[in-house]
Image (spheres, helix red, strand yellow):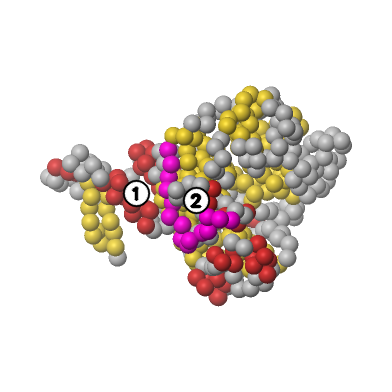
Amino acid sequence: MKLLKHKLGDNIVNAPNVLLDVDGTFDKNGNNPNDIYPAIYNISQNKVTDVNYMSPQNGMAMEDLKKQFEKEAVFKIDLESYIKHGDCGRQIKLSDITDSVTYIPLKTNYNLPIAEIQEVRTTDDFIFCLDTQQKLFCFNRNGDFITLIGKRGEGPEEYINIADFDVDGRKGEVYLFDLQRHFIMVYTVDGRFSRRIKLPDNILNIAKYYDSQFIAYAPEYLGNERDKLIIFNDKGEERDSILFQQEENISNTKIDIFKMATFTFQSHFLCRLPFSDITYALTPIGNQYKYVEFQQGKYKLPYEIGSNVESYNENLNSSYIFEPRFYKCQNLIFINFFFKMNNYQLLYNSDKNVFFTVFKGKYPVGIENDIDNGPPFWPVYIKGDRAVGIATAFNSEYDNPVLQIINITLENKE
């Protein structure tokens, strides 16, 4: 199991199309000399169609397994079917996925208010929030303000614009991605400047990878030979690159916000290239496999519309799915997208292959909170089985957003 996780990623143990035979059901105890090695069984219609042993004589067995995952996505989500036929017809409430809600008011003094929160990260000891005013706040786990991380400006220890940020709780470091100057600004969790890492000009965005690694999207239209991901160490030195094949021919003459890969880290590193139905997962050693596929069919946004800002805005009311994105926890996938000028919030149960419509309308709301009749819930950050949402201030002397924390306990639910 350790080998599988290392080669193919942690999610291998939870993939719906994978069974780990930990009980030895397939152990024949026969005379085949290969029985001492791990075996890969391919099963179709309840019958074993092929057996591949990971023996010294078969050094490509793991590579062949990796290629199987590259061909087929682990999770296939049929959004076209949802648009045509709707959901299962049952309203879902917060008590269906959790037993309790914890609220953490974010406490700052009156002259340091928090604007709308863009991103949240948590460690065992701290909470970090980036707001729309480009301020990065650090709180303890009770919501008490500790410090601001960094300062906006043009000095050597300052940032101009935070494109994104990440945290390494083990090393006690915070990484601010200032892509306007192509630097990673590194601070300690108590706000002290540590160093900055220079990045090349041929990347568009970057994120923290496993351990001391960073991964950046280097598109063809910035002078690269192909669209690719570049892996850096914490000194800014390139260690490796991963090539991608775009689904459609993207022009290399125009740069706009619609041509940026999106990164998320939800137990493992996920990447989706622009105009792609596929979200890829990356393992710690750089192997990639198809993780989530949004099957959009005739509702998929054409490249010629999505790649042009004017055309994009003109077609917002057309029958295309705009900006699909997701968060995953256990077998639940929280999905957002726009369709005909409406926000859609869906909850998809991958085990049962059913959709629940949480909300459809102009302003997204979230899952009805029937546990304590508090604000509705929708995740903005997931780490393990813990999901974090954001509510506006209520029942608090601090006029700041309030974090909602839930632990997904679906295994106890029907």
- Residue 382 inside the magenta-drawn segment: no
Residue type at the position of mark 1: Lys
- Residue 246 inside the magenta-drawn segment: yes
Residue matched to label 2: 220
User: What quarter of the picture does the N terminus occupy?
Assistant: top left
Per the rendering, the mark at residue 66 is: 1
User: What quarter of the picture does the C terminus occupy?
Assistant: bottom right
Location of residue 339 in the rendering, given as x and y in whole percent from the top left corner: 63, 68
Lateral position of residue 200 relative to residue 281, left or right = right
Q: Is residue 102 above or below residue 334?
A: above
Question: Seen from this angle, which residue lies furthest left?
Answer: 31
Give the residue displayed 81% in from the left and 48% down from the top.
Answer: 394
Location of residue 147 in the rendering, given as x and y in whole percent from the top left corner: 74, 29
Q: Are marks 1 and 2 in contact (CB under 8 Å)?
A: no
User: Between 366 and 297, which is closer to the camera in this rendering?
Assistant: 297
Mark 1 or 2, closer to the camera:
2
As helix, strand or loop, the secondary structure at mark 2 comes to helix
As helix, strand or loop, the secondary structure at mark 1 comes to helix
Q: Is residue 51 above or below residue 207?
A: below
User: Does the image show residue 396?
Assistant: no
User: Between 165 and 361, which is closer to the camera in this rendering?
Assistant: 165
Give the residue displayed 78% in from the left and 49% down from the top.
Answer: 392
User: Does the image show residue 227?
Assistant: yes
The boundaries of the magenta stretch are 240-254
